[in-house]
Structure formats: C-alpha cells, structure tokens
Amino acid sequence: MHLKSLKVFCDIIRLGSFSKAAALNGVSQPSASQLVNHLEDRLGVELIDRSRRPFRVTEAGKAYYEGCRDLVQRYESLEGLVRGLQQSPGGRLRVAAIYSVGLGQIHRVVEEFHTKWPNVELRIDYMHPDQVRAAVLAGEADLGVTSFPEADRQISVTPWRDEAFALAVNPDHALASARQIAVQTLDGERMVMPQAGLRVRDEIDRWLASHRVTAKVAAEFDNLEFVKRAIEVGEGIGLLPGQTFVNETFAGTLVRIDLVDEAGRPETFVRPLGVLRRRDDEVSQAAENFLQLLDRHANDSPEPLPRAATAGSKDGGAAQAATV
C-alpha cells in the first residue's frame, strides 16, 4: 500500500476530520474517503465507523493507526535525513507560526538563527491558529508558534512569552490624548473585535465581562491586520496585544493607550504565546537551537521593523493578513 494513503489515514485519525486531513495532504475530501475505503477493502475490516457523527475509530482502526503512524514517521524522518544530506549539511527545520507573531515577533530570532547555523534550512510558514496545530499534528511542521497554546496527549507546549493587551485607537479619537484609561471607560464604546469563535475573542469577551463592561461590536474580523485597518479608519477602538501594532504606533496611524483598573493599577490581561510540538517526536538539535533563541529573546522590547522587512521575507513571511 502506498505510504501516501497511510499518511492520509493517519492524519484523518489524528485530526478527527476527513476534510482537514485532505487539505493537509493536497487531496479532495472524497479522495481521502476513497483512500480509506481502499484500505478497508484490502484488509477486509472496518477501520472507521462513519455511520456516527463524529466518526468512531474501530478497534481494528486503532491498531492499524498505531502501526501506520510509526511507519509514516520513520519514513518522514528518513526523507528529512536524505534531504538534509542533499540540500544542507545542517539539516532542516520547519516552523509554523500564526501571522501576528511573524516578522515583528520572531524576526530577530530568525536572523540570528541564519547567522549562527547557516547550513540549516529554516522554513517559516505563517497560518491560522487551527492550521498551526494541524500542521504540527500531521508532521508538516517540527514546531508551531501560537497563542493560547493547549497541551494534550499528542501535543506538548513550551511557554514562550506573555503579551499585554493595550487599547488601540485612531489618532483623531476622543481618547487618543490619554496615556492610560480605566477598563470601565470602554463600556458602551464602539469596538472592532476579532471574529466570534476565535480563542482570542473568547478571552476578550470574558475579560470585559469580568469588569462589567459591555462593548458595542462595530465590526469583527478573523485576522489582526483587518482589525488594525478598521481602527485606523475610525470604525471603532480595539484591544490588541501591544507588540502587534508597534509599527502602526511608530508611523502614527494608531495610538496605544495602556489599561488600568479603577484604582489606577496596571491591568494584567495578556495573550500567552507558546511553542507546540508532537510528544512522540524526538527534538532535533536545530529545533533545540531555535527554542533556545526564542527563550533568549522572550523579553525583548518590541521595535518597529524596517520597511523592507515588513514587505516580505525569504522565510515565507510575506506581508499577509495577521491572523490572531
């Protein structure tokens, strides 16, 4: 049986979804389903009970998955070793990261990594948070940098840094002259929000509710870039991790206002960032080096990037919508 079919099968089980596994492997959902049908016909057993929603993996399917997972991982490791020998004596490291911790957050890490280990082929892919996790689970990425990371039996988390939220406003807004404001000031204000259903939106809603603040949602988007643009044109104000709009405050298109409680004490509403990896994978030396650099730069003060850096990156960091 072709290893591609085994990988698709493993991804279906690992992700709990035919559609996600199909997307990761560049095939259609019907094709992924057909691959499983062929496997079941070949083995003469049912691997996945699709009569239920969500589907249930049979005992035979669980046993087959465990064996196939080892085969696929060993084959991918072999491919990585051979590619490393052919393309770069230092090997290869694949990192998936959410857009909003892209160039502005790990730019210095990437630059230092290239300087210290020029023979390692470092690839950074920026994507949606769900895609980051899926890429790590499927073995498409060695490490995944994401917000509000969660560990489970398949994924381990290495905490990286906490980013304090701040208020972002248009320079012409009535609040723009304030250096700090009490959270309660936001009650009734028109706010631009991350899209409902995103983890960051859930946390913002929960935090505002804890302060008895009711915001009027003026607009909502599934990425930070659009949130920032909407605030810039005066659609409303918004809560954003301070590090994500350094360039806009430097350019004068947004104003940052720090948040305090009613007694004037700084608020500690943060977005935690962390690094995901599969528990059953050995951590390569390149990955260890990358994690050490991340840790070393965890407390770096944010600084605006040169215009050329924000325009694109040889590491897959072209200026794209900054998904939260």
Image: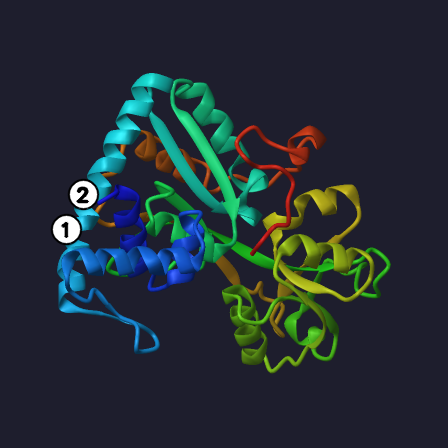
Say the numbered circle drawn on residue 67: 1
The residue sitting at 18% across, 69% down in the picture is 58
**Spot occupied by residue 291 in the image (x, y as percentages of width and height):** 36, 38
Say the numbered circle drawn on residue 71: 2
Q: Amino acid at mark 1?
A: Gly
Pick whichever, 80 or 202, lies toward us: 80
Position of 133 with respect to 38 (left or right) is right
The residue sitting at 40% across, 47% down in the picture is 25
Say the numbered circle drawn on residue 147: none
**Spot occupied by residue 124 in the image (x, y as percentages of width and height):** 48, 36
Q: Are marks 1 and 2 in contact (CB under 8 Å)?
A: yes
Q: Residues within 10 Å of mark 1 (few under 14, many from 20)?
A: few
Pick whichever, 297 or 21, lies toward us: 21
The residue sitting at 61% across, 52% down in the picture is 242
Quarter of the rendering occupied by the N terminus: top left
The residue sitting at 49% across, 40% down in the picture is 125
Pick whichever, 140 or 8, lies toward us: 8
Pick whichever, 239 or 219, lies toward us: 219
Q: Is residue 155 in sight in this rendering? A: no
Q: CA distance from mark 1 to mark 2?
A: 7 Å
Q: Quadrant of residue 304?
A: top right
Q: How is the image coloured?
A: rainbow
Dot 1 falls on a residue whose secondary structure is: helix
Dot 2 falls on a residue whose secondary structure is: helix
Q: Quadrant of residue 231?
A: bottom right
Q: Is residue 324 in sight in this rendering? A: yes
Compared with 173, 289 (above or below) is: above
